[in-house]
Amino acid sequence: MAEMTIRAADNADIDLIHRELVDVIMTSPHYSDHFKRHEAARLDKNFLRGLIAIDPWHIMIMCADGVPGGAMVSGPECGAIFRYWSWVFPSHRQTRLGMFGMRAFDEHWDNSRFHKAFTFVRPDNEVARMLLKRYGYRETVLLQQHIFGEDYLLIEKFYTRQDVPYDQGAVPGRFGRLKRRLQGLTGS
């Protein structure tokens, strides 16, 4: 059995994560063509670099025997953590990385920074719904015509949060944006 590990992404991972993310978006049977184009354009390399600048763990890379085989992309959202995408790469679909990643995500983020994790799932995505339910997430509400006229389920899991200031994420400002732009040009 493969040794499964999880690690935070760095800028050297951006090309791989972006390529695999666009692939899972564009090949998913659960979304409209309009949503796929929008989501692939929105979650570009600069968006991913911004998440790493806030906290490199916002892009968690799941590995089997040291080889990247899946990822989870998240971001802070008003005191909660929003799970943008979680997926296993086609090369690793017959492994247990998805289940491993679910546990690792919650173990990492249920640390008093956020009061809950949440995501949106299309109602017909039975696999995602089942996996989230298995790990303690609950379907809170059906959001009718929520994104480009399509229905989505709001699925969430409450975390243990102490009475501490909320994590505000980080707004990089002009200097941070310039630094990211230069890193993008130099490939570092």
Image: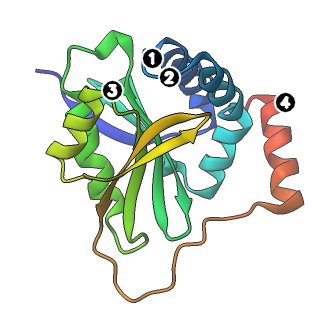
For marks 1 and 2, give the one nearer the viewer. Answer: 2
Disc 2 is placed on an element classified as: loop
Pick whichever of labels 3 and 2 is earlier in the sequence: 2
Would you name the residue on which mark 4 appears?
185
Mark 3 and mark 2: Cα distance apart in space: 10 Å
Disc 1 is placed on an element classified as: loop
Front position in the image: 25 or 175 = 25
Front position in the image: 125 or 160 = 125
Mark 1 and mark 4: Cα distance apart in space: 31 Å
For marks 3 and 1, give the one nearer the viewer. Answer: 3
Disc 4 is placed on an element classified as: helix
**Rendering quarter of residue 64:** top left
In the drawing, does residue 159 fall left or right of residue 3?
A: right
Q: Position of residue 25 (x, y in %)?
A: 52, 21
Residue displayed at 43% across by 15% down: 29
Confirm whether residue 100 shows in the render. Answer: no
Task: Identify the amino acid type marked 1.
Answer: Ser
Check residue 28 in the rendering and tell me which mark sits there, or answer none.
1
Would you name the residue on which mark 3 appears?
124
Quadrant holding the N terminus: top left
What colour scheme has been applied to the protein in the rendered image? Answer: rainbow
Would you name the residue on which mark 2 appears?
31
**Rendering quarter of residue 26:** top right
Residue displayed at 51% across by 19% down: 20
